[in-house]
């Protein structure tokens, strides 16, 4: 099956899944809007499935509807494949999760789609879960010999019973400033830059509002770089881009509200450093067994020119200002063509698994 036409010669039916239970719900709506507008309507029939903040599902006309119209009407608490009278078309050729954060990017929706034995865009269960959890991802990076910034992981029970000891450990092992992050969240939600130890406890408490595990990461004086990856068994890297934050770091407000951060695409790097960023991005992608797509984030230290992996986003933003599609456009793949390729990769991955007998239907 091709992303242009399926085996019957008809348009490919693509089910967009968007919204979701995560704190990144509203970002998902913006991304889904952009994906919907850039999918080629001549070759794709688009089924729009909105998931509200309670995790209930509803078939809607499109992600372009105003939010008050998205949330009106009858929702389902579960989407039973093959069920009758659900009000949701269930015969899509491929499912495209445009769901950021927990319950969408963390392997949960991927597991649901695997259970349904249907093709979908993006990474599988293992890589989605591993990449979503920043603490686990760093362990896997290190196990594969990839460079990561010095960090500590704080679990909520340990914090509740020993705040003083943990604050002392941070002082002993890391130097300020540090970044305090929920382990399982994106879009810079719940992240603080801490340059004063007296503000550390508040930063940890903020992160714990979004997760039970927190990563405290050594700050790096340097440049923020990003690289987009595309592919399954043979992934390829885009040209790297650079983020020039308007504030102290690229936070939620600047990503989605103020929009004053500047970007350099491609990043002004030497040819050698460009190749190194691309190689390290592909190595990280393979180390966490990603497929389909990902955006890899880096820090390039000013003093040493050492490159550190920050994190992998398996469902990167698809908004009009998002780096993932912009980097591919600068690398010669416009947004509509990028979506075609992603859909082809999802169909190909599903076919490959079935040939291997990983899926079985009696």
Image (cartoon, helix red, strand yellow):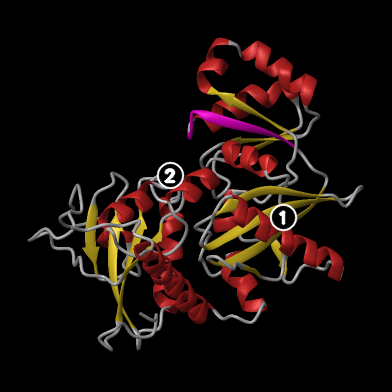
Q: Is 25 located above or below residue 162 in the figure?
A: below
Q: Quadrant of the C terminus?
A: bottom left
Mark number, residue 18: none
Q: Position of residue 79 (x, y in %)?
A: 20, 54
Q: Is 103 located above or below residue 41 in the figure?
A: above
Residue 82 lies in quadrant:
bottom left
Q: Is residue 201 left or right of residue 91?
A: right
Q: Is residue 83 left or right of residue 360?
A: left
Question: What is the residue that sits farthest to the left in this orientation?
Answer: 85
**Residue numbers of the magenta segment:** 210-218
Q: Position of residue 129 (x, y in %)?
A: 48, 44
Q: Position of residue 101 (x, y in %)?
A: 46, 48
Q: Position of residue 109 (x, y in %)?
A: 35, 51
- In percent of the image, x 45 and y 46: which residue is there? 106
Circle 1: is it few (<14), some (14-19), or many (20+) Cα within 10 Å?
Answer: some
Q: CA distance from mark 1 to mark 2?
A: 25 Å
Mark number, residue 245: 1
Q: Is 30 located above or below residue 220 in the figure?
A: below
Q: Nearer the viewer, residue 296 or 279?
A: 279
Residue that label 2 marks: 102
Which label sits in the foreground, 1 or 2?
2
What is the secondary structure assignment of the residue under circle 1?
A: loop
Q: Quadrant of the N terminus?
A: bottom left
């Amino acid at each position: 099956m091709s992303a242009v036409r399926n085996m019957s010669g008809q348009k490919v039916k693509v089910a967009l899944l968007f919204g979701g239970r995560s704190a990144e719900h509203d970002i998902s709506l913006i991304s889904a809007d952009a994906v919907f507008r850039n999918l080629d309507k001549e070759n794709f029939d688009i089924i729009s499935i909105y998931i509200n903040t309670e995790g209930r599902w509803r078939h809607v006309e499109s992600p372009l509807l105003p939010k008050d119209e998205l949330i009106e009407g009858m929702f389902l608490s579960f989407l039973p494949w093959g069920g009758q009278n659900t009000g949701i078309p269930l015969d899509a050729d491929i499912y495209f999760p445009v769901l950021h954060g927990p319950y969408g990017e963390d392997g949960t929706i991927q597991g649901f789609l695997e259970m349904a034995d249907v093709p979908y865009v993006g990474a599988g269960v293992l890589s989605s879960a591993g990449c979503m959890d920043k603490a686990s991802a760093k362990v896997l990076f290190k196990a594969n010999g990839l460079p990561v910034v010095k960090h500590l992981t704080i679990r909520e029970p340990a914090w509740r019973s020993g705040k003083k000891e943990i604050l002392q450990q941070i002082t002993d092992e890391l130097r300020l400033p540090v970044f305090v992050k929920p382990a399982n969240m994106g879009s810079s939600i719940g992240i603080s830059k801490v340059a004063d130890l007296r503000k550390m406890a508040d930063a940890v408490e903020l992160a714990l509002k979004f997760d039970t595990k927190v990563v405290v990461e050594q700050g790096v004086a340097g440049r923020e770089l990003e690289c987009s990856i595309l592919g399954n068994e043979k992934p390829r890297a885009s040209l790297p881009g650079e983020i020039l934050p308007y504030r102290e770091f690229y936070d939620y407000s600047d990503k989605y509200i103020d929009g004053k951060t500047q970007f350099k695409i491609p990043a002004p790097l030497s040819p050698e450093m460009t190749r190194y960023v691309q190689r390290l991005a592909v190595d990280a992608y393979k180390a966490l067994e990603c497929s389909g797509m990902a955006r890899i984030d880096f820090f390039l230290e000013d003093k040493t020119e050492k490159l550190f992996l920050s994190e992998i986003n398996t469902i990167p933003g698809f908004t009009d200002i998002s780096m993932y599609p912009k980097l591919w456009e600068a690398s010669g793949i416009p947004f509509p063509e990028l979506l075609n390729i992603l859909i082809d990769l999802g169909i190909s991955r599903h076919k490959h698994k079935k040939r291997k007998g990983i899926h079985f239907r009696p």
